Image (cartoon, rainbow, N blue to C red):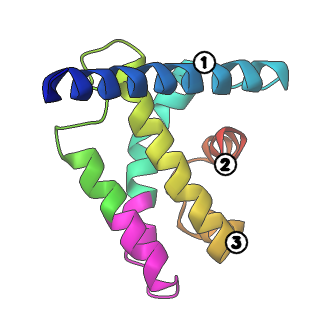
């Protein structure tokens, strides 16, 4: 067994685990009666990017949270992802999970008021975002 076989095995295993996680998250949201549709979630994208930028620039947030937000923005800007975006649905799932984890860390550290204070979109969009988180 050479190194390439090991690397391919690890990458394949990670992709399978990632796909199972995405399916489990989707199934859990449906079981809880979450009415959020994929279309609603996709409409949030520009507002969420502006929210991340505003939160990252907020000096009242802890420095560690701001660093995580800047790293999240950098991850979204770099074309290299854990799962390539050319793979339908799953390709964007890694971006969604990374953003959700970053925003959850903001809520844990600074409280939900930080999201409300910096949200650039509509109140319905904020409600959808909080349901997704």
| Helix, strand or loop at mark 1 | helix
Residue 88 versus residue 42 in the image, above or below? above
Rendered image: mark on residue 23: 1
| Residues packed near mark 3 inside 10 Å, few (<14), some (14 to 19) or many (20 plus) | few
Quickly name the residue at label 3.
Answer: 111
Lower position in the chain sequence, tag 1 or tag 2: 1
Rendered image: mark on residue 127: none
| Helix, strand or loop at mark 2 | helix
| Helix, strand or loop at mark 3 | loop
Task: Tell me: 128 left or right of 40.
Answer: right
Question: Where residue 36 sits in the image (x, y, percent)?
Answer: 68, 25
Residue 124 drawn in magenta: no
| 7 vs 83, nearest the viewer | 7
Work out how far the residue at label 3 is from the one at label 2, CA to CA, in angstroms. 17 Å
Lower position in the chain sequence, tag 3 or tag 2: 3
- From the viewer's perspective, is the residue at label 1 or at label 2 nearer? 1
The quadrant in which residue 29 appears is top right
Lower position in the chain sequence, tag 1 or tag 3: 1
Q: Quadrant of the C terminus?
A: top right
| 41 vs 64, nearest the viewer | 64
Residue at the (52%, 87%) spot, across then down: 60
Residue at the (35%, 12%) spot, across then down: 88
Total tally of numbered discs in the picture: 3
- From the viewer's perspective, is the residue at label 3 or at label 2 nearer? 3
Rendered image: mark on residue 123: 2
Task: Tell me: 88 left or right of 7.
Answer: right
Q: Quadrant of the N terminus?
A: top left
Residue at the (56%, 24%) spot, across then down: 22
Q: Which residues are magenta?
A: 52-70
């Amino acid at each position: 067994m050479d190194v390439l076989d090991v690397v391919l095995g690890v990458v394949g295993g990670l992709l399978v685990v990632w796909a199972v996680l995405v399916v489990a998250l989707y199934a859990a949201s449906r079981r809880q009666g979450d009415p959020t549709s994929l279309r609603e979630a996709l409409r949030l994208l520009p507002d969420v990017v502006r929210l991340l930028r505003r939160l990252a620039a907020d000096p009242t947030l802890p420095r560690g949270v701001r660093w995580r937000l800047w790293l999240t923005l950098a991850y979204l800007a770099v074309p290299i992802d854990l799962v390539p975006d050319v793979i339908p649905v799953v390709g964007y799932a890694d971006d969604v999970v990374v953003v959700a984890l970053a925003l959850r860390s903001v809520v844990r550290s600074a409280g939900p008021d930080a999201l409300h204070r910096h949200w650039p979109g509509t109140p319905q969009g904020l409600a959808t975002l909080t349901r997704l988180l």
